[in-house]
Amino acid sequence: MPRRVVQSELEHKGVVPVDSPSPGPEQVLGSLEARVLQVLWAQNQPLSVQDVLEDLNRGQSQRWAYNSAMTVMARLAEKGYLARDREGRAYRYRALVSREHFATWEAGRAAGDLLEEFGDAAVAGFARELKDRPELLDVLRRILDESDRGGPA
């Protein structure tokens, strides 16, 4: 199968192509969901929908509606990415995962999906990609060594 077909199938599943930067929220979430998470990570404190909306709309010609931001933030809370705490009649939201944990978790989920669907071919593809990336091959060796010793995997 040509690389472009495989790549487009993987992109559809939210998998980042090999030559892309590390996975960020925009590769696995909707555009507004990703931007909300990025605002909360940058502010590093609980924010109201209005606080997030002001940040999202700052300097933008096309502005997000309050209801859109509120709906997206409620969905992110339902998905487990955000916590929400009642403050008066409104909620304040905070990220439950750091940017780094998000990338690790999503990359693991994507790898699991690839292994489930493609099995040995996915392993062979990973191996070919790692061959020319010694720093990543070292990371894999370290993880496998820890796993063999019963440490964290």
Image (spheres, grey):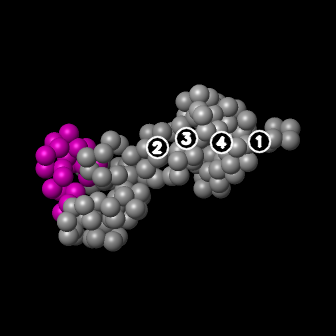
In the figure, is residue 97 to the left or right of 106?
A: right
Look at label 2 and name its amino acid.
His
x 35%, y 70%: residue: 116
Camera sees residue 47:
no
Residue 144 at x, y percent in the picture? 26, 52
Camera sees residue 128:
yes
Look at label 1 and name its amino acid.
Tyr
State the count of labels.
4
Numbered label attached to residue 130: none
Q: How far apart, in angstroms, are the residues tagged by discs 2 and 1?
A: 24 Å
Residue hosting label 3: 35
Residue nearer the viewer, 12 or 118: 12
Residue 66 at x, y percent in the picture? 73, 43
Magenta span dominant secondary structure: helix
Task: Single out the residue that lies furthest toward the right.
Answer: 88
In the figure, is residue 3 to the left or right of 92?
A: left
- The image quarter in which residue 46 lies: top right
Query: Between tags 2 and 3, which lies in front?
Result: 3
Look at label 4 and name its amino acid.
Trp
Residue hosting label 2: 101
Earlier along the polypeptide chain: callout 4 or callout 3? Answer: 3
- Is mark 2 in CB contact (under 8 Å) with mark 3? no
Query: Between tags 3 and 1, which lies in front?
Result: 3
Secondary structure category for the residue under label 1: strand
Q: How far apart, in angstroms, are the residues tagged by discs 4 and 3?
A: 11 Å
Residue hosting label 1: 91
Is 133 located above or below residue 12 in the figure? above
Numbered label attached to residue 64: 4
Q: Which residues are magenta?
A: 123-144
Look at label 3 and name its amino acid.
Arg
Secondary structure category for the residue under label 2: helix
